Each structure stands twice: as structure tokens, then as C-alpha cells.
């Protein structure tokens, strides 16, 4: 019973973090055909932004979390204006490869910039909730509950934005058929800018949550980024609800394996499972028949 | 800028192409307001390229296009759409994972007026009642004929001054083609301004005010539909009878 509650707590918390990291990555990948290799670095940026605003400037933590979202969104905008826009225009059919290589470079630069500014020692992040409550004999930290709640709220907000608003419709239309969207009068370049800004904002908040259970380091986004990539592939490209389901499901299984067989078995078993899923369904669990292109 | 009275769309010496050489070699034509102008010709001779060039999807290399007297030079597709040009592209290009209703909603993307939207939607549903029946269905699950209707309905939702329709009969069964051309006949009765592209002149002669024969990127014949159908040697040469 205690083990079960521990597994559920860990699984839900990691699932929430993976899901949040995944939707940011999947949104950009699915609608622009762009695998943003700098997504993990945007997570780190969010984590450090909350540190700067709350710890260094002494402002309230909720404001710092908003600042983290803002920093992520701004980074997304800069990424689009300085790099992605010109790659779309010049790289043509090679866009998917070019943008992947370019964002690897940006990721390295951003991580080193953070290292330069904040130093290499791990920092304690100001966002956190202390205390815990008990279910029977098991202890569930409030921090885990907050992480799950914040993730769910952010995901619901994004889902509403994509499904209900005019901007969301334009994003979906562009993802499903870029030329048709142009003919409807959608300013596709502006839509791409919005997608990167949204993804950056979600990454910023995700970085705050991730660093609240670990510590701040420039590479804090690397592991969530890897997991997000796995979730995208397992769920099938660009399928946001599928990616969220995959994130929670796989995190639950990973937590179960960690408690049952020992922590070091979690990731290998996860990867084996992913390989098996991809052999069974090469387009992912909920994948479309074809991959979307620009 | 002086607007030619009663002329909605004017093309003057249009050259255009993709990566290689020109596909269109100097196309000049006008679409007067309230008329249906049809471009016929064999496949692969530039009919779709012509429409794509007008709506800005394909870059123009030379020439001038005016819509209601306004020069479209250098404008991007979304700006051209905003000026009142709706393009129903070849192969429909629907939004496959959206419902019929959402596709129609995207057609009216540029209009933020809910009353205008409701009026347009009512018109489209009256013209294409099947779309009303299927409004909640995902576009990719529709039949070919229904998809074509969504494409046309989505084009009409823009409330544009000129509608361009690219081969509405493509890939459909004869009976469905008839239905689609009945719809275009209704649009003609409503006095819409339409630039239509079609491979088979016999299908569209009764709908057209003016017909142009597009061969190898050039307009080789223009005139009244009845005249074209009498020119058997032209039909023989260009369209295989």
C-alpha cells in the first residue's frame, strides 16, 4: 500500500513534468516540422529566470514564475526572428535538418551563457513548497501536488488556447495545411512566431518546476528534453493529447520499475518499452499515417 | 489609380514558374464583374500555376495583376486573400483534422464580424445542404465529392469579390461531377465573379461567359464558349477531341 502510493506520487509528478516538457516540444515539432534541440536549454533559462527575479531581485515568487514564462517566450521569439525565419526562407526542403543542427548550436551557446552568468555550482531555486501530508503511513510532499496542479493548469490553458481561440485555429490550420492556411489569409510567419513564443513560455514554467525538485544547473533541461523527445515519438508526431497520455503512462511505468527493481532499472526498461512500441507501431501509438512537413 | 469599370481581376503579361524555366509565358486576361471566365487546356500546361500565381502561392516573374483596380505586385498570399480573392485549390487542401464546420470557419478567418459569418454560413448551407448535415464530421473522413463541397464552401465563406476554382471535377465520379457543376451553375445565377479552370471544355461551356484555351503556358484562343465548341480542329489538337 505504501509502495503503491509512493509509485503513484512519483509517477504523477514525473508524468506532469514530462508532459509539460513534451507539449512544448511537440507543439513546435508538429506545427512547423521543427525539432527544437534548444528546448531543454529553454527549460534551464526558465529555472534561472525564477532565481534571478525572486532570489537576486527579491520579488515575489509568483511574479518570478511569470517572468520565467516571459523569458522563455522571449527566447522563442528571438529564436524565430534570428534563426528560424531565415532558415524557412533559405533552407527549403532541408529545413528540418538545418533547424535541428542550428538549434543544437543555440542550445550549447545558451547553456554556456548561463554557466558564464551564474557559475557552475548548483543553485537552490526559490520556487518550492515545504511540508507534506500523510495518506496512511505514507508521506506525500506538498511540492509534488503543486507541481502536478501547475502542470495541469498550464496544459489545460494551452489546450483551450489551441482549440477555442482564433489564434489556436490558425495554428492548427497552419500545421494541417500550410498553403491552405495562407489562402485563408493566415499570416503563417506570425503563426510560427506565436508557436515558438507559446512553446518557450511553457518551457520556462516547466524549467521552474523541474528545478524545484532538483537544483539549478545549465544542463537541467537535458533529461526532460530527452524524455520529451521519447514521448513525442511514442505518441506520434504533433499529437498533443497523445503526448500527455504517453508522458503520464510511461512515467507511471518507470516509477513502478524503479520501486520494484531498483532506481537504476527505470530508464533502461522505459527505453526497451519504447523500442517495443515503435516496432509494433512505427508511427507511434496515436500517430498519423504521414509525418507533417513544412 | 483608375479602375476599369466592371472589371474585377486583370492579368497583364504574366510570366511565372517554379525552380526551372517559365511555366506561364505572358498571360493576359480579364475577369469582368459578375461573369464566369473559364480557362481550359490539357493537364500540365499551367492552369493551376496560373491560379497559384494570382493568389500569390507561386512567385510571378513578370507582368501585373490587379484586383478591383489594386495592384497585387509583391503582396503575399495572406494579403491578397484580404483584398478579396478566394482560391479553391486543386485537390481541395482541406484541414484534414478539423470538422466541416471548422473548415468553413477557417474560410472566414479574415472576417471578425459574427453577423457576417452567420449570414455567409447560412448561404453556404443553403447552397450545399450536405455540409450542414455533416458539419461535425472530420474532413478527412468525408467522401471525395463532400470534400470538394467543403473546399468550395470554404472558399465562399471568405465573402470574396472574386472566386477562383481549380478543376472542381478532378478525381470525382461522373454523377458527382454533375452535382458540383450544378452548384457552380447556382453561383452563376447569383451573379458571382468566378475564374474557373477545367480540363474538359464541354463540361463548362454552358456555365462560362468567356473561355480561354491555355496551351503550353500561352493563351492560344479566347472567345465565346459556343465558338470554341465549333472549332473542332482546336479541340482535336489541344484536348484530343
Image (tube, rainbow, N blue to C red):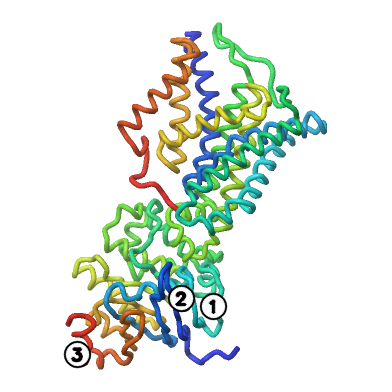
Q: What x and y, as percent, mark residue B169?
A: 26, 70
Tell me the SS state at disc 2. Answer: helix
Q: Are marks 1 and 2 on the same chain?
A: yes
- On residue B233, which mark appears? 3
* Image quadrant where residue A221 sits: top right
Disc with the residue nearer the chain's start (1 vs 3): 1
Disc with the residue nearer the chain's start (1 vs 2): 2
Chain designation of label 1: B
Cβ–Cβ below 8 Å for labels 3 and 2? no
* Image quadrant where residue A211 sits: top right
Label 1, label 2: how many angstroms apart (C-alpha)?
A: 8 Å
Residue located 72% across and 39% down the image:
A67
- Tag in front: 3 or 2: 3
Task: For residue B161, say whether it is visible.
Answer: yes
Query: In this figure, which residue is indicated by the disc labeled 2?
Result: B54
Instruction: Report the front residue among A285 and B176.
Output: A285
Label 1, label 3: how many angstroms apart (C-alpha)?
A: 37 Å
Callout 2 environment at 10 Å: few (<14), some (14 to 19), or many (20+)?
Answer: many
Callout 1 environment at 10 Å: few (<14), some (14 to 19), or many (20+)?
Answer: some
Query: In this figure, which residue is indicated by the disc labeled 1?
Result: B72
Disc with the residue nearer the chain's start (3 vs 2): 2
Q: What x and y, as percent, mark residue A94?
A: 47, 52
Tell me if residue B227 comes above or below residue A152 in the rendering. below
Query: Which quadrant is home to the C terminus of chain B?
Result: bottom left
Amino acid at each position: 500500500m505504501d509502495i503503491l502510493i509512493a509509485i503513484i506520487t512519483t509517477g504523477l509528478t514525473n508524468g506532469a513534468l514530462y508532459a509539460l516538457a513534451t507539449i512544448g516540444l511537440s507543439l513546435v515539432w508538429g506545427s512547423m516540422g521543427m525539432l527544437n534541440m534548444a528546448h531543454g536549454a529553454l527549460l534551464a533559462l526558465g529555472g534561472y529566470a525564477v532565481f534571478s527575479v525572486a532570489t537576486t531581485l527579491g520579488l515575489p515568487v509568483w511574479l518570478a514564475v511569470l517572468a520565467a514564462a516571459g523569458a522563455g517566450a522571449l527566447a522563442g521569439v528571438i529564436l524565430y526572428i534570428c534563426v528560424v525565419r531565415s532558415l524557412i526562407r533559405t533552407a527549403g526542403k532541408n529545413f528540418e535538418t538545418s533547424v535541428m543542427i542550428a538549434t543544437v548550436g543555440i542550445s550549447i551557446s545558451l547553456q554556456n551563457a548561463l554557466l558564464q552568468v551564474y557559475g557552475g555550482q548548483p543553485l537552490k531555486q526559490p520556487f518550492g513548497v515545504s511540508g507534506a501530508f500523510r495518506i496512511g503511513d505514507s508521506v506525500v510532499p506538498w511540492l509534488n501536488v503543486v507541481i502536478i496542479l501547475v502542470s495541469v493548469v498550464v496544459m489545460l490553458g494551452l489546450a483551450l488556447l489551441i482549440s477555442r481561440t482564433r489564434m489556436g485555429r490558425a495554428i492548427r490550420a497552419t500545421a494541417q495545411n500550410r498553403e491552405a492556411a495562407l489562402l485563408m489569409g493566415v499570416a503563417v510567419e506570425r503563426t510560427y512566431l506565436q508557436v515558438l513564443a507559446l512553446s518557450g513560455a511553457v518551457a520556462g514554467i516547466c524549467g521552474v518546476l523541474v528545478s524545484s525538485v532538483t537544483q539549478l544547473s545549465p544542463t537541467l533541461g537535458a533529461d526532460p528534453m530527452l524524455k520529451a523527445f521519447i514521448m513525442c515519438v511514442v505518441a506520434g508526431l504533433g499529437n498533443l493529447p497523445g503526448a500527455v497520455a504517453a508522458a503520464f503512462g510511461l512515467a507511471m511505468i518507470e516509477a513502478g520499475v524503479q520501486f520494484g527493481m531498483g532506481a537504476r532499472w527505470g530508464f533502461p526498461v522505459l527505453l526497451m518499452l519504447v523500442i517495443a512500441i515503435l516496432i509494433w507501431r512505427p508511427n507511434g501509438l496515436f500517430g498519423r499515417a504521414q509525418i507533417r512537413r513544412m | 489609380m483608375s479602375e476599369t469599370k466592371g472589371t474585377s481581376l486583370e492579368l497583364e503579361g504574366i510570366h511565372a514558374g517554379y525552380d526551372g524555366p517559365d511555366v506561364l509565358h505572358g498571360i493576359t486576361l480579364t475577369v469582368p464583374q459578375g461573369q464566369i471566365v473559364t480557362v481550359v487546356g490539357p493537364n500540365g500546361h499551367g492552369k493551376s500555376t496560373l491560379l497559384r500565381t494570382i493568389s500569390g502561392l507561386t512567385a510571378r516573374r513578370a507582368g501585373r495583376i490587379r484586383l478591383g483596380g489594386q495592384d497585387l505586385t509583391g503582396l503575399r498570399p495572406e494579403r491578397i486573400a484580404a483584398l478579396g480573392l478566394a482560391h479553391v485549390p486543386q485537390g481541395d487542401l482541406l484541414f484534414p483534422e478539423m470538422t466541416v464546420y471548422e473548415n468553413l470557419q477557417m474560410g472566414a478567418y479574415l472576417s471578425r464580424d459574427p453577423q457576417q459569418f452567420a449570414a455567409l454560413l447560412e448561404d453556404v448551407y443553403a447552397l450545399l445542404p450536405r455540409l450542414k448535415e455533416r458539419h461535425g464530421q472530420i474532413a478527412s473522413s468525408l467522401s471525395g465529392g463532400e470534400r470538394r463541397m467543403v473546399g468550395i464552401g470554404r472558399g465562399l465563406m471568405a465573402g470574396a469579390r472574386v472566386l477562383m476554382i481549380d478543376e472542381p471535377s478532378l478525381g470525382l465520379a461522373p454523377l458527382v461531377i454533375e452535382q458540383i457543376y450544378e452548384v457552380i451553375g447556382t453561383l452563376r445565377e447569383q451573379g458571382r465573379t468566378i475564374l474557373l479552370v477545367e480540363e474538359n471544355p464541354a463540361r463548362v461551356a454552358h456555365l462560362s461567359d468567356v473561355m480561354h484555351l491555355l496551351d503550353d503556358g500561352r493563351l492560344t484562343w479566347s472567345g465565346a464558349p459556343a465558338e470554341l465548341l465549333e472549332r473542332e480542329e482546336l479541340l482535336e489538337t489541344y484536348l484530343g477531341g
